[in-house]
Image: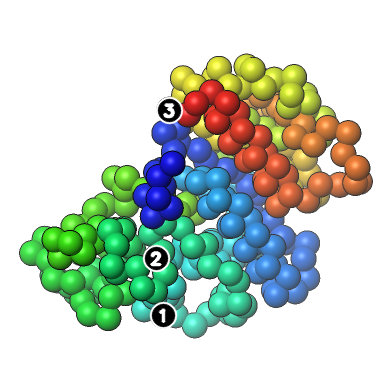
Amino acid sequence: MPRFEEVPRRRTRLDVLLPSSLTAEVPHLREKTFRLGLVARFLAAFRVDNLILYHEDLKPNKNAELIKDIMDYLNTAPYLRRRLFPIKPSLRYAGSLPPLNIPTHPEAGSEGTFHYREGVVVSPGRVDAGLGRLIRTKRPLKKGTRLLVAIDPESREYRLISKKRAPVYAGFKTSIVPERLDELVAQYDVKVATSRLGRAFQDSARQLAARLSAAKSACIAFGSAKRGLYDIAKLQGFNLDEVFDFVLNVVPEQGVRTIRTEEAVCVALTIVSAVELLMGR
């Protein structure tokens, strides 16, 4: 098992698709922020690559921007947040959330061991990586570029690495898209939808494992508090069962009336992770 600082990114790209209305029914920003913080922790814990926010009614909304602001904030190393994020209403309570503590957000005192850490280009030839001093580089990098810095205390060398080529898990990227779900998921090798009306996950576990073992990309889509994915598919004008490879009930015989989206995210990612472990990925 690798050191935590060297936990690798996934072999199979895994994206989570959530409605932009997530937490829209929650009246207070404090609770919205708390629930989004839980979602962020779940996504990071299972090394999700991308969080994609889709509009169930295909109409842009301010809630999507709120979600993105908070997710981007949490995916930024704490020592870079003041530099990169201005004071804004959407982040009023974000500072109270627990940090993601992903491998590229090292703790204080980690300078004595080899590790990767997030950095940002602050001026030509200068990178801030939270070391108390700026790193010099001769590479012509644009101001504002986010990257990783590999730090080797033995050789006292710094190596700059693109986030896209990161050998370790470096968090997830959040995007807001205008496309319908059926258009959005066409790019993936394996497409999973979650629904209480779907097939019990254990009945599809072997098939899912086989498909994931050969896939380069996979996605898991979730519905909203008001509409399940079958309703959203009907609203957007496509057949859910024809578009997705699997429509799964991840909590069969559930003991509560409704499963919150953030709860479904945790359960579904646990299942996918277990399936991957069983097939040795």
Q: Which comes before the other along the chain, label 1 or label 3?
A: 1
Measured as percent of width and height from the top left, residue 219 is found at 55, 35
Relative height, residue 136 to residue 19 (above, below): below
Which residue appears at 65% of the width and 69% of the height?
33
Could you tell me which residue is drawn at 26 percent across and 52 percent down?
Answer: 162
Q: Nearer the viewer, residue 111 or 56?
A: 111
Which residue is at 66% across, 35% downward? 271
Q: Which residue is mark 1?
A: 82
Mark 1–mark 3 distance (CA, rounded to whole Å): 36 Å
Q: Is residue 43 left or right of residue 230?
A: left
Q: On screen, 160 above or below 208? A: below
Which numbered mark, 1 or 2, is in the foreground of this view? 2
- Viewer-nearest of discs 2 and 3: 2
Q: Residues within 10 Å of mark 3 (few under 14, many from 20)?
A: some
Q: Residue 216 got which mark?
A: 3
Residue 120 visible here: no
Image quadrant occupied by the N terminus: top left
Which label's residue is closer to the chain start, 2 or 3? 2
The disc labelled 1 sits on which kind of residue? Arg
What's the mark number on residue 106? 2
Q: Is residue 105 above or below residue 189?
A: below
Residue 155 drawn at (x, y percent):
13, 61
Are dots 1 and 2 in contact, CB under 8 Å? Answer: no
Question: Identity of the amino acid at label 3?
Answer: Lys
Percent across and percent down for residue 240 are: 69, 27
Distance between mark 2 and mark 3 Cα atoms: 29 Å
Q: Viewed as shown, does residue 8 lie left or right of 240?
A: left
